[in-house]
Image (tube, rainbow, N blue to C red):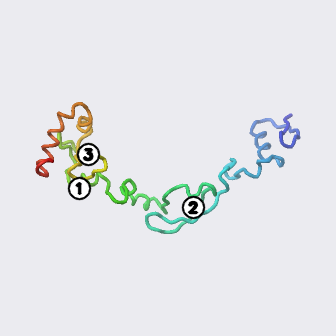
Amino acid sequence: MWKCKHCLNEFNLSTKSEKANHSRWCIKNPKRDSWDKSKGTISKYGQLKSFSVECSNCNNKFNVTEREKLFPQKDNYYCNRSCANAIGGKAKADKHTTYYRTICFNYHDKKCVVCGEEKIVSVHHNDHNHNNNDPMNLIPLCPTHHQYLHSRYSDEIQPIVDEYIESKYGAVS
């Protein structure tokens, strides 16, 4: 015999799940009304509710279902995957600049200036200032040579980078 801790009635229940179900839905359980019946959990964030939001890309209005106390969960809502993907690099860059890789590859070939690697190319900020996205400051390098520039071996690669900048833009200041 099993005794419910809420109603104090005794039951002949054989499994733990039967006991848990009775305990959860017992009429004398004080938490019974706060259970989310769709998920089987207690929600401290309120009931599910429909909210009207606007797509951050196309400005279409649509509804989302979220908990009352959690809305809005996101900074931006999108009506579909296409609108979310249309943001692209704009979501990563702030509103007044363009993403630095885009700037670099608009002005330079997508290949390492040291060895000519074209498959994997990273972008090096020559003055180490990541806010300076001037094309003259953005240098395409393979990961190996990029790492060289950030190590004690930078003196082996820096003359090649300086020579590249000088040939492309004239005198290096």
Going by the image, does 167 lie left or right of 136? left
Q: Amino acid at mark 1?
A: Asn
Q: Which mark is residue 64?
A: 2
Q: Which residue is mark 1?
A: 106
Few, some or many residues within 10 Å of mark 3 (<14, 14–19, 20+): many
Residue 116, percent from left and from top? 18, 42
Circle 1: element type: helix
Residue placed most toward the observer, 65 or 159: 159
User: Farthest right residue?
Assistant: 9
Q: Which residue is mark 3?
A: 125
Which quarter of the figure has residue 87? bottom left
Circle 3: element type: strand
Real-space CA distance between mark 1 and mark 2, rounded to the nearest whole angstrom: 39 Å
In the rendered image, the vertical position of residue 45 relative to residue 151, given as above or below? below
Between disc 3 and disc 2, the foreground one is 3
Of mark 3 and mark 2, the one earlier in the sequence is: 2
Residue 111, percent from left and from top? 21, 46
Going by the image, does 78 lie left or right of 34? left
In the rendered image, the vertical position of residue 10 relative to residue 110, given as above or below? above
Going by the image, does 4 lie left or right of 122? right
In the rendered image, the vertical position of residue 139 relative to residue 93, given as above or below? above
Whether the residues at callouts 1 and 3 have beta carbons within 8 Å, the answer is no
Residue 105, percent from left and from top? 24, 52
Residue placed most toward the observer, 42 or 127: 127
Few, some or many residues within 10 Å of mark 1 (<14, 14–19, 20+): few
Residue at (51%, 66%) from the top-left corner?
54
Q: Amino acid at mark 3?
A: His
Q: Amino acid at mark 2?
A: Val
